[in-house]
Image: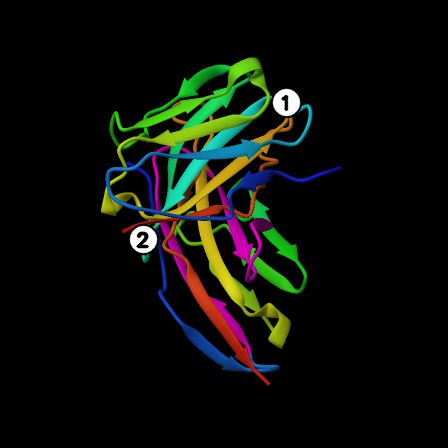
Amino acid sequence: EAGVTQFPSHSVIEKGQTVTLRCDPISGHDNLYWYRRVMGKEIKFLLHFVKESKQDESGMPNNRFLAERTGGTYSTLKVQPAELEDSGVYFCASSRSGQGLGYTFGSGTRLTVV
Amino acid sequence: GNSVTQMEGPVTLSEEAFLTINCTYTATGYPSLFWYVQYPGEGLQLLLKATKADDKGSNKGFEATYRKETTSFHLEKGSVQVSDSAVYFCALIKTGGGADGLTFGKGTHLIIQP
């Protein structure tokens, strides 16, 4: 089966601009997660979708971040306006409901805000 | 809250050397423990996991034992290869309710020299 796909793989934007990251989970995976790794720090949980509903968004840093999963398929994570501290690698993961801890991660999007 | 502490790298070893990457955790309840690996240019891959005390996870020659008394999950391999060069992340997830995202350590960059 195809893996979790994220794009773009890299994005360089100026402070104040808007960027939208996309994640395509494995087909049939109801659970979709976003994580972020700021350079030199831990990978931090951002939020969790079950189908199109936000199950847990306790990790979203502030209201400049907006995640959507219309139709319960792919998800987007928009940062508007971007700040320097938003730079990092954004990972997406998906899993099938009822399969416990079977997450599959994407390769990540490296975001650089200059 | 939950946290994971792992030795920070880079850790540089010669091929065929013995590897230990330390990981300790703080968590309420009974978490499940994981080691993830990220090879250059790729996404996070699950290396091994353990879901209860004294369980040993193993894969590709790597092992880690869930030690509840010392709250540790150290990663070991008897003889490393150049192809093991990657970033290794220790992680946990709390089972039985609450926020369901993974909590990661900062990652350990492992470099194996021929």
Tag 2's secondary structure?
A: loop
> Is B75 situated above or below A86?
below
> Is A97 situated above or below B79?
above
Residue at 69%, 27% in the rendered image: A27
Instruction: Read off the chain for label 1.
Output: A
Q: Which residue is mark 2?
A: A41
Is residue A71 one of those drawn in magenta? no
Residue flagged by tag 1: what amino acid is it? Gly
* Relative to A61, B95 lies left or right: right
Front position in the image: A72 or B23: A72
The rendered magenta stretch, by its main secondary structure, is classed as: strand
Is residue B36 one of those drawn in magenta? yes
Front position in the image: A36 or B18: A36
> Is A50 situated above or below A107?
above
Stretch in magenta:
B18-46
Tag 1's secondary structure?
A: loop
Q: Position of residue B49 (x, y in %)?
A: 57, 47
- Residue A29: mark: none
Q: Position of residue B46 (x, y in %)?
A: 59, 48
Q: Which residue is mark 1?
A: A98
Marks 1/2 in contact by CB < 8 Å: the verdict is no
